[in-house]
Image: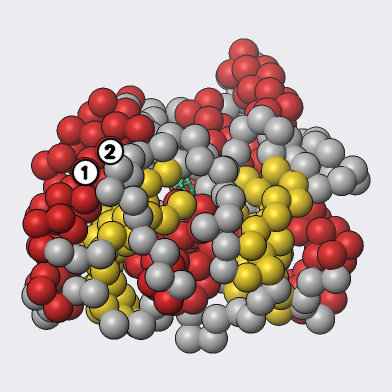
C-alpha cells in the first residue's frame, strides 16, 4: 500500500512516498529558505510562486527516488490546512488534478494531524491514548489523542507560537531566518542565564510567549544603547530565551500528562527539532516513568512523509476527500 504525500503549507515544497503508513521510500523537501532569508520571514506571495515552480519536480523526484511509478500509487494524501492560503492552494490543486487525471483516490489531511502522526514513522510508534505537544512556527498546542480522529486540545498559546517567538527573537538579535536552529546552535556557546520570565509557568495548560519576547526586546535595546551587544551577549540572550521557552513547554506538558494520567508523550513540529527541548523533555519523562516519542529532526520540521503517514489512517477508514476539496488557512484539529 503506497501513499504519495504532499505538503505545501508554508515555505517548503515537499513530496514523499510512504509504504504502509510507516516506511519512508522517499521524502523530498525543497526548501525556500534562500528566497525568504533576506526578508527575515516568509513572504506569502513569493512562497506560492515558488511552490508552483517546484511542485512537479519535487513530486517527480519523490517517485524517482522511491523507484515507484505514479500508477503504483494507491492514494494521494495532501495537506489542505492550516497554513498560508496561497501555498496550500498550490498543493491542493496539484493533488486534485493528479488524482482526477490518474484516477487515484485523494485524501485531505490537517497539517497538525500530520505532525502528530510523524510519530508513526519511528521504529516504535506510540499506542493510543497519548499526549501530543505540537510546537511549530504557527502552532503551540497540547492535544490529548485518544485515537485517529479523536483529538482534544488541552492547552495552547494565547499569542505567539513558540517557533514564531524563536524567529522574532532571532530577528531582534540581527540573526538570520529561520531563527530556531540558529538560536539552538548559539545557545551552546554559553552556560549563562539572564533569567527571563517564564510566562504562566504555574497556571493551567495555556501558554504565552509574547511577554517574553517583549522582555527580550527591552533587554536587547538596553544592551545596544550601552554598546554591549557583542557575540557573547547574543549567545547569552539566545540561551536565556531558549531556557525560558523550553522550561515552559516541558512544565506544561508534564502538568497535562499528570492531570490526564497519560504516560506517553509525542513531541512534534519544527521546534521539536530543538536539542535542548528534546533533552529536557526526555529527562522529565524518564524521571516520571513516562515514555516520550520524538521523531528525527528531518521529520519534525515540515515534510510530506508525515502527511502520508496520517493519510494511511484515512485510507484504512475509507475516508476520502470530497471533489470540491479546497485549501483552508484556518483549520482547527477536529474529527476526521
Ligand atoms: O513545523 P514547521 O517546520 O513549520 C510550521 O508548521 O510552522 O516549524 C517551523 C518552525 C520555525 O519557527 C523554526 O524556527 C522552528 O520551527 N525550528 C526550531 C528549530 N528548527 C526549526 N526552533 C527551535 N530549535 C530548532 N532546532
Ligand atoms: Zn508544520
Residue 108 at least partly seen: yes
Out of 161 and 173, give the one closest to the viewer. Answer: 161
Residue 154 percent coordinates (x, y): 76, 51
Q: Which quadrant of the figure has residue 318?
A: bottom left
SS type, badge 2: helix
Q: What label sits on residue 93 in the rendered view?
A: 1
Above or below for 67 versus 196: below
Q: Is residue 187 visible?
A: no
Residue 90 x/y as whole percent: 23, 41
Q: Is mark 2 within 8 Å of ligand 1?
A: no
User: Where does label 2 land, which residue?
Assistant: 89
Q: Nearer the viewer, residue 161 or 48?
A: 48
Up/down of 330 relative to 145, above or below: above
- Give neighbour class at mark 2: few <14, some 14-19, many 20+ (Cα, 10 Å): many
Q: Residue furthest top?
A: 225
Q: Distance between the Cα atoms at labels 2 and 1?
A: 6 Å
Indicate the position of residue 106 as horizontal and vertical percent values: 28, 60
Judged from this view, the residue extending furthest toward the bottom is: 124
Above or below residue 209? Residue 69 is below
- Look at 75% across and 40% down and name the residue there: 207
Left or right, 58 with reference to 228 = left
Residues at marks 2 and 1 touching, judged by CB atoms closer than 8 Å: yes
Looking at the image, which is closer to me, 130 or 92? 92
Amino acid at each position: 500500500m503506497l501513499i504519495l504525500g504532499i505538503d505545501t503549507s508554508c515555505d517548503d515544497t515537499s513530496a514523499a512516498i510512504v509504504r504502509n503508513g510507516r516506511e519512508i521510500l522517499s521524502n523530498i523537501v525543497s526548501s525556500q529558505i534562500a528566497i525568504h532569508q533576506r526578508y527575515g520571514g516568509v513572504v506569502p506571495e513569493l512562497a506560492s510562486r515558488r511552490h508552483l515552480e517546484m511542485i512537479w519536480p519535487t513530486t517527480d523526484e519523490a517517485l524517482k527516488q522511491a523507484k515507484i511509478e505514479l500508477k503504483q500509487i494507491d492514494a494521494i494524501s495532501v495537506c489542505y490546512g492550516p497554513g498560508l492560503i496561497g501555498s496550500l492552494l498550490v498543493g491542493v490543486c496539484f493533488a486534485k488534478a493528479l488524482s482526477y487525471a490518474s484516477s487515484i483516490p485523494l485524501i485531505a489531511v490537517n497539517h497538525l494531524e500530520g505532525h502528530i502522526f510523524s510519530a508513526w514513522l519511528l521504529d516504535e510508534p506510540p499506542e493510543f491514548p497519548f499526549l501530543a505537544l505540537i510546537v511549530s512556527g504557527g502552532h503551540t498546542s497540547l492535544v490529548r489523542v485518544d485515537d485517529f480522529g479523536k483529538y482534544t486540545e488541552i492547552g495552547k498559546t494565547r499569542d505567539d507560537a513558540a517557533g514564531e517567538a524563536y524567529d522574532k527573537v532571532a530577528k531582534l538579535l540581527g540573526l538570520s531566518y529561520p531563527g530556531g536552529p540558529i538560536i539552538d546552535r548559539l545557545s551552546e556557546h554559553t552556560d549563562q542565564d539572564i533569567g527571563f520570565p517564564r510566562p504562566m509557568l504555574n497556571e493551567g495548560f495555556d501558554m504565552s510567549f509574547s511577554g517574553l519576547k517583549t522582555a527580550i526586546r527591552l533587554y536587547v535595546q538596553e544592551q545596544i544603547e550601552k554598546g554591549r551587544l557583542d557575540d557573547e551577549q547574543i549567545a547569552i540572550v539566545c540561551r536565556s530565551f531558549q531556557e525560558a521557552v523550553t522550561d515552559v513547554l516541558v512544565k506544561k506538558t508534564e502538568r497535562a500528562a499528570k492531570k490526564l494520567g497519560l504516560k506517553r508523550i509525542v513531541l512534534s513540529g519544527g521546534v521539536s527539532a530543538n536539542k535542548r527541548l528534546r533533552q529536557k523533555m526526555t529527562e522529565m519523562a524518564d524521571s516520571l516513568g513516562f515514555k516520550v516519542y520524538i521523531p528525527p529532526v528531518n521529520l519534525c520540521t515540515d515534510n510530506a512523509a508525515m502527511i502520508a503517514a496520517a493519510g494511511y489512517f484515512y485510507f484504512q477508514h475509507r475516508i476520502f476527500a470530497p471533489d470540491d476539496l479546497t485549501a483552508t488557512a484556518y483549520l482547527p484539529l477536529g474529527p476526521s
